[in-house]
């Protein structure tokens, strides 16, 4: 009988939104884990704070580029947070 395997963090066969949900859940669980250092938990908080700051690298007045830099900072902040967290 085949064993029930959980999907990897990012699998090419899964759709984009399912991968996004898995990564968001992993980030939430890592953020709540007491073994993750506090300085590392500041990374996603800082990325989210960038969204509400009035100063931007690319102002939101530019139609698409203003929102893309916000999205890039948040995605980069969370992916860096996940990759720097301890494996255990």
Image: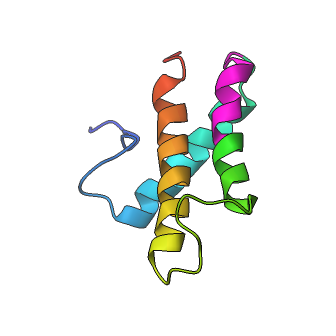
Question: 87 above or below 2?
Answer: above
Residue at the spot 58% in from the left edge and 80% down from the top edge: 61
Q: Is residue 81 left or right of residue 18?
A: right
Q: Picture quarter containing residue 53?
A: bottom right
Residue at the spot 74% in from the left edge and 32% down from the top edge: 32
Question: 45 above or below 41?
Answer: below
Q: Picture quarter containing residue 57?
A: bottom right
Q: In this view, does 79 lie to the left or right of 56?
A: left
Residue 36, percent from left and from top: 66, 20
- Magenta segment includes 52: no
Q: Looking at the picture, tell me which residue is in the foreground, 12 or 63.
A: 63
Q: Is residue 30 visible?
A: yes
- The image shows a total of numbered marks equal to 0
Magenta stretch in the rendered image: 35-44
Residue 3, percent from left and from top: 33, 36
Residue 26, percent from left and from top: 56, 40
Residue at the spot 45% in from the left edge and 73% down from the top edge: 65
Q: Is residue 22 visible?
A: no
Colour convention of the picture: rainbow
- Magenta segment includes 40: yes
**Type of secondary structure dominating the magenta stretch:** helix
Residue at the spot 64% in from the left edge and 25% down from the top edge: 40
Quadrant of the snapshot with the N terminus:
top left
Residue 30, percent from left and from top: 64, 31
């Amino acid at each position: 009988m085949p064993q029930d395997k959980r999907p990897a963090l990012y699998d090419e066969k899964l759709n984009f939104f399912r991968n996004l949900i898995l990564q968001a859940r992993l980030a939430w669980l890592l953020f709540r884990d007491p073994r993750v250092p506090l300085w590392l938990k500041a990374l996603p908080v800082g990325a989210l704070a960038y969204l509400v700051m009035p100063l931007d690298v690319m102002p939101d007045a530019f139609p698409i580029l203003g929102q893309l830099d916000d999205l890039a900072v948040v995605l980069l902040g969370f992916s860096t947070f996940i990759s720097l967290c301890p494996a255990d």
